[in-house]
Structures are given as structure tokens and as C-alpha cells.
Image: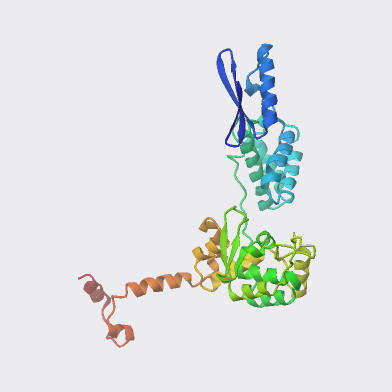
Amino acid sequence: MGIKFKKGNWLIDYYVNGRRKREKIGPDKKLAEMVLKKRRVEIAENKYLDVKRELRVKFNDFADEYLAIHSKINNRSWETGDKINIKCLKCFFGDKFLHEITPLMVDMFKIERNKDVSNATTNRALALLKAMFNKANQWGRFDGNNPVKGVKFLKEQARLRFLEKEEIAKLIENSAGYLRSIIILAVNTGMRKGEMLKLKWRDIDFQRNIIYLYETKNGEKREVPMNDTVKTALMKISKNEDSPYIFCNKKGLPYTDVRKSFFTACSKSGIINFRFHDLRHTFASQAVMSGIDLNTVRELLGHKSLEMTLRYSHLSPDHKKRAVDLLGSRLDTFWTPEEKTGNSVKIDPEVRILNTNT
């Protein structure tokens, strides 16, 4: 009998009446040692019960465990995301055990939650609940089927708000200090707010005109090309010799948010119903309308799949025309030089078809 660490979880191993038993406990070694000790006592006193009968974990307790062990460690925006949704989930599911929660209950939660919030917000709570049950299974707290698996999520209406060229110029004009540079970077690179605020001078290659992003949303390193506008904006920033960060206060600490100053700049510019993240939409929208192909935009944005980038496809009304024009130029063998210039005589369509088939 003993404990073993495998794939991020501690496992305990013991024998009962000659039969080997294994349990997945989770990432907590001390907990694994405690459970193993308890099993040994139960076996010695002939009081061992089937493990499955002991999986009576209350939702409230597991929710707190999930928030502390998983969300706070792996989700940088846990306070504005998981924390709020978990509070809502705990209010509905209360002291029920995990194995008591059914797909019907999840559907009932979906209906009740959707009375107060949008479809998108409701779906975020459902997605979190699904992830919690997956983790509960992985940690050995739950051994049934995920009750969210068969629940249909609500349809969401994609929000796509972006600025026109005149609005971009006005917003930059009404922005001051570090915010001005950040907005210039956002509309010229499509970088996320968090990516920009964490930028360090060592991440900038002025010779190759590349910005290196080491901390991204999907955890993958990304290279962002700089145009002359971005390069000039960065070179104008006064460097704090006591800090590695580009956007930092006098003490050298990086800014954590620009919400207040950003909303002030939007108000001065007469721009309403606009979030900072919409600057990323602005970059993508303007890029597509400039004729840049969707796959290149996908790479610049750091999207793993083209599906997320397709929301901008309708902004390029002539992209289909360019495609068929390109095909036409490649297959342009059906007309004589006279016909192309409009000087040809009229030919019966049936004759033309006959001739092209010979």
C-alpha cells in the first residue's frame, strides 16, 4: 500500500480481502496521505466500505475547493469570472451532493439564470459547471456522468463593435499619456489589453520590428509585427530606468487597468457602447476591410482556429468577387481577343458551346 503521483494527481493503492484497490485523490499530497491512513484503519477494524458509497461531496464544498485549487491558480481573471459564477451556482444547487445533480436540474438552473442575465452570461455559468464536474471526476470527488454534458447551451448573438477611421483618430486625439500609446498599439496590432500592459522593453525588437508575446491567453508564444506607427509610438515613451515594464507608474509598477481613463477618452470623443476589447475588433475589422485575407488576420490575432475570425468575413464585401476574378483570369480561354475587346460579331450561344466542347 502507498501513494503515487501521476499526471498531476496523487493516487492511493491498498488491498482489501486480497483485492487491490486504487483511488485517485487529487493534487493534494497531504489529503492523499490522510485518506490512505483512514483506509488502513478501516481495513484493520473491518469497517471498510466501498469507496463509491463514500463519494458524498456537497456542491458547496467542492465549489470552494475548485475556486481555491483551480481557478485562482489557472485563471487570471477568476475574480470577475469564476468567482461570480460559482456564487450564483452555489445559490441554486446549495447543499446538494454532486451525485444528486441531474441534467434536469441543470436545465432548470439555465432557465432561472437566463431570467436575469443574457444568453452569453448564462452559457458562461453552464460552461463553468461542466468544467467543475470534469475536474471533480479527475480529482476523485465524483464518479458519475457529467450532468451538463447533454444540456443544450443558449444561442448567443455575436457582438461586433468597431471604430471607423475618423473615430479612431478622434479617440487617439482625446487620449493622453500612456493611454494614447496603448490605443495606438491596440488598433495597429490587435493585441489584448493584458498582453500590452505586461509588455517589457526586452520584448521589443526594434531592428526586426517584432513584439514578442510570452504570456498570451492560450499560453502560446506569439510574434506581433510592428508597423512604423507602432514603432514611433513606443520610441516616444519615456523609459523608467527602475522598471522593465513599458507601461508603468512612477514606482515602476505595471498598470493593471486603464478602464477609467479609457472611458473618459471615449466620452470626450462621443463614442458610446464601446469596450476596450472592441479595439481588438477594430483592428481585425479594419484589416479585413483593407483587403487582408482572413487567415492572415487569424494569425495576427492569435486565434487557434479560423472559426473565431470568420465573424469579420462579412466586412469584406468584395472578397468573393476577388476570388472569382482570380479564377476567371486563370481560366480565361473561352473568348477570342476580338470578343474581349467587344469588337467581335455576335455568335449564337449554341455554336459557342459546341465549339468549346470540341
* Coloring applied to the structure: rainbow
Q: In this view, does 52 lie to the left or right of 64?
A: left
> x%, y% of residue 221?
57, 56
> x%, y% of residue 10?
62, 31
Q: In this view, does 199 lie to the left or right of 303?
A: right
| Number of numbered markers | 0
Could you tell me which residue is drawn at 72 percent across and 37 percent down?
A: 65
Could you tell me which residue is drawn at 71 percent across and 46 percent down?
A: 82
> x%, y% of residue 92?
74, 39
Quadrant that contains the N terminus: top right
Residue placed most toward the observer, 5 or 325 = 5
Which residue sits furthest bottom? 343
Which residue sits furthest left? 358
Dividing the picture into quadrants, the one containing residue 149 is: top right
Dividing the picture into quadrants, the one containing residue 336 is: bottom left
Whether 245 is drawn above or below 127: the answer is below
Residue placed most toward the observer, 42 or 95 = 42
> x%, y% of residue 130?
63, 41
Dividing the picture into quadrants, the one containing residue 139 is: top right
Q: Using the rendered image of the protein, determine whether residue 161 is visible from the camera's viewpoint.
A: no
Could you tell me which residue is drawn at 71 percent across and 35 percent down?
A: 62
Could you tell me which residue is drawn at 76 percent across and 60 percent down?
A: 253
Whether 357 is drawn above or below 69: the answer is below
Residue placed most toward the observer, 79 or 28 = 28
Residue placed most toward the observer, 317 or 196 = 196
